[in-house]
Image (tube, rainbow, N blue to C red):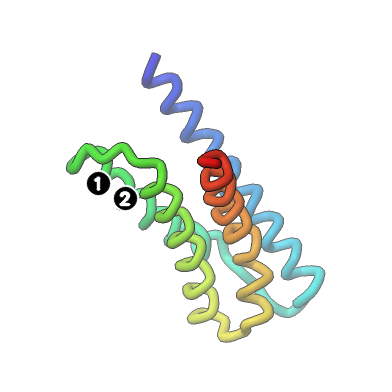
């Protein structure tokens, strides 16, 4: 049963990253038409965060929601800095990474709100 839940969670996460990428690319096409992005701009930081989370779970056996939410926020910031390094255009950087940042900040805010 645990393997089925893990598989479903992995599929939902993959679809969510692809939807975020499509929305970010759409924002770039609408507001900054000359800028091109590639899927690996979003995948590389997400894979780095995934590896860090796997290390926390598998090696250190840490089960902390705050840790995973903060690594998601760090991943969104890494996407922003990676695109800025590649494109050197702040408007394109903010528009593309806005979707990833909003998702991370919304999840973190929802967890903070649930404490009160």
Residue shown at 68% from the left, 80% from the top: 91
Determine whether the residue tagged by mark 1 lies in a helix, strand or loop: helix
Q: Where is residue 57? Give x, y as percent.
A: 27, 39
Q: Where is residue 58? Give x, y as percent.
A: 23, 38
**Residue 36 versus residue 4 in the image, above or below:** below
Q: Quadrant of the C terminus?
A: top right
Q: State the residue position of label 1.
A: 55
Q: Which mark is residue 83?
A: none
Please indicate whether residue 29 sits to the left or right of residue 8 in the image.
Answer: right
Please indicate whether residue 25 sits to the left or right of residue 42 in the image.
Answer: right
Residue 97 vs residue 30, the one in the foreground: 97
- Point out the residue furthest to the top here: 1
Q: Quadrant of residue 59?
A: top left
Alpha carbons under labels 1 and 2: distance apart: 6 Å
- Point out the residue furthest to the front here: 116
Is there CB contact under 8 Å for labels 1 and 2?
yes
Determine whether the residue tagged by mark 2 lies in a helix, strand or loop: helix
Q: Where is residue 46? Give x, y as percent.
A: 45, 55
Residue shown at 40% from the left, 55% from the top: 71
- Point out the residue furthest to the left here: 59
Residue 75 vs residue 83, the one in the foreground: 75
Residue 99 vs residue 34, the one in the foreground: 99
Q: State the residue position of label 2.
A: 51
């Amino acid at each position: 049963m645990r393997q089925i839940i893990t598989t479903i969670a992995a599929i939902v996460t993959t679809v969510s990253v692809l939807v975020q990428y499509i929305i970010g690319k759409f924002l770039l096409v609408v507001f900054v038409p000359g800028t091109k992005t590639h899927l690996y701009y979003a995948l590389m930081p997400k894979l780095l965060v995934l590896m860090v989370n796997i290390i926390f779970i598998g090696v250190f056996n840490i089960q902390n929601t705050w840790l995973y939410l903060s690594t998601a926020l760090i991943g969104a910031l890494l996407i922003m800095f990676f695109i800025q390094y590649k494109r050197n255009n702040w408007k394109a950087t903010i528009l593309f990474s806005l979707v990833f940042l909003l998702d991370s900040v919304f999840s973190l805010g929802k967890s903070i709100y649930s404490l009160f």
